[in-house]
Image (cartoon, rainbow, N blue to C red):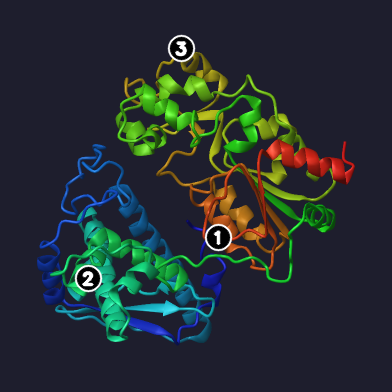
Amino acid sequence: KTVNCLEELENIDSDEELDVEIDPKLINKLDRQGRKYEFVGDGYSDEDEDTSDGDYEPSESGSDILDDYDHLDNINEIKKIQKQQNDITTSLSLSTTTTTTASSTNSTTTTNTTANTTSTSSFTTTEVLNQETTQSLEQDGEREENNEEEDEENIELVARSFMYKYINEKKGSGIAPMEFTKEIGFKLVLEEEDDAWEIITAFLTRKKVAVNLFLNYLKYNSLVKPYRKKIADLQLDTFDKVIELFQNSKNIVIITGAGVSVSCGIPDFRSKGGVYETIEKKYSLPQPESLFDIHYLKSNPRAFFEFAKEIWPGSHRPSPTHHFIKKLEVEGKLLRNYTQNIDTLEHVAGIDQEHLVNCHGSFKSATCITCNYNVPADDIREYIMKMEIPYCKKCSDGSSFMKPDIVFFGESLPDRFDQCVVQDIKKVDLLVVMGSSLQVQPVALLPDILDKNVPQILVNREIVAQPHEFDYVYLGDCDSFVNELSAKLNWS
């Protein structure tokens, strides 16, 4: 998630501002109207549901599109964009010796949102708390937990107020309600007596939905993420042209997913008979992905450690695709391999660490969830093979355990990921996505942030990431693609 605005934030145009006014009477009105409707579908849980005790509970409707953890991630990302923008604003103020003053009143709060020339907007001010709270924070010199919660609540208020204003502007433009909801990816089903705009307002100003859409607006200057289209004059429509492209490219970035290791005997995650289907049959979980969710792991580690043996590396050999990527490195064409896999087969194939990013970590080591004590993977292997929880020997409290250094849902990616992305987006001349569903962010965002003139190839059993358009799509096994390509390139 962090990579979307790294470059764009350096080019802020502070002349374009959008004022969002938080009116308590308006918020109360939205609350009253919102309670008139009960929205159903793929999991929009009760917004008033209290999960503050940290327990991981599924909603009655199953998998929430926006659960409490998604909502918190969105809040934190808005804070991060806000902080980055404040750092830039401070730097600009120091260089021009100008001072920017934000004003607020007790009854209303105004937040300025700045849009840049590359259609990315950023939350530019920390003045989301009322004046009394801000002064109190300055006097105390530190944030307490209740102030942190108040900060989050005010971000929610800003998002809801923004959405109310946005909806009314669209309504005033004369757009049909059905067309408006279609534009932002929602299907609106009405009965005769329904007031379409009232229902739209009630739904899109719910705090989780509003924050999610507001975050999109900050990043893309649009409520929905823009998608890439094919390079018009490239016409990459034959395999011979693909061969020519590989021959001429000097800085190739490869994104690999579980599909490149299937031929090694390692099942992928989402296909029929894959890891998630196996998990679903074997364990009673809120959803299969919960086994790799950091919140679920901390509250119930036994399920993961009973299953970890199934995906522990060491008994598999690299595929032809792994060796092909190594060959790209030997030929001096590999800029970077961003692997989402945790099987370490890239290392076994001999790909140099300099050209490799283990986006989701690996099983090479393990770290205590409490004291951060780190050990080599061999130190916990015996416990994994016995399907036991490897407790920390330093903590010795019977509850702190050693977590393999793979990235779980809800955890940040290694710093190296961001560092390499910043370098590589300036150099890459060809992107190849191989065996990935492109469903897990932030890796899934990489094809979106590259220059639109960098060719992109997808090698997968099915088309993914739609409506994103790749310049060439090879539907089939990764090994078949690289074998055919290697033969044409006369690579042994």
First in sequence: mark 1 vs mark 3 = 3
**How far separated are the C-alphas under marks 3 and 2?**
54 Å
Q: Marks 2 and 3: in contact by CB < 8 Å?
A: no
| Residue at x 32%, y 62% (from the top left corner) | 187
Quadrant of res 122: bottom left
Residue 418 in view (yes/no):
yes
Q: Residue extending furthest right?
A: 490
Quadrant of res 191: bottom left
**289 relative to 111, above or below:** above
Q: Amino acid at mark 3?
A: Lys
Mark 3, residues whose alpha carbon is within 10 Å: few (<14), some, or many (≥20)? few
Q: Marks 3 and 1: in contact by CB < 8 Å?
A: no
Q: Amino acid at mark 1?
A: His
Q: Amino acid at mark 2?
A: Thr
The residue carrying mark 3 is: 386
Residue 393 in view (yes/no):
no
The residue carrying mark 1 is: 468
Q: Secondary structure at mark 2?
A: helix
Q: Position of residue 214 (x, y in %)?
A: 35, 68
Residue situated in front as seen by the camera: 86 or 478: 478
Q: Which quarter shows the C terminus?
A: top right
Q: Position of residue 436 (x, y in %)?
A: 58, 44
Residue situated in front as seen by the camera: 254 or 471: 471
Residue situated in front as seen by the camera: 15 or 171: 171
The residue carrying mark 2 is: 201
Q: Position of residue 382 (x, y in %)?
A: 51, 13
Q: Position of residue 52 (x, y in %)?
A: 20, 45
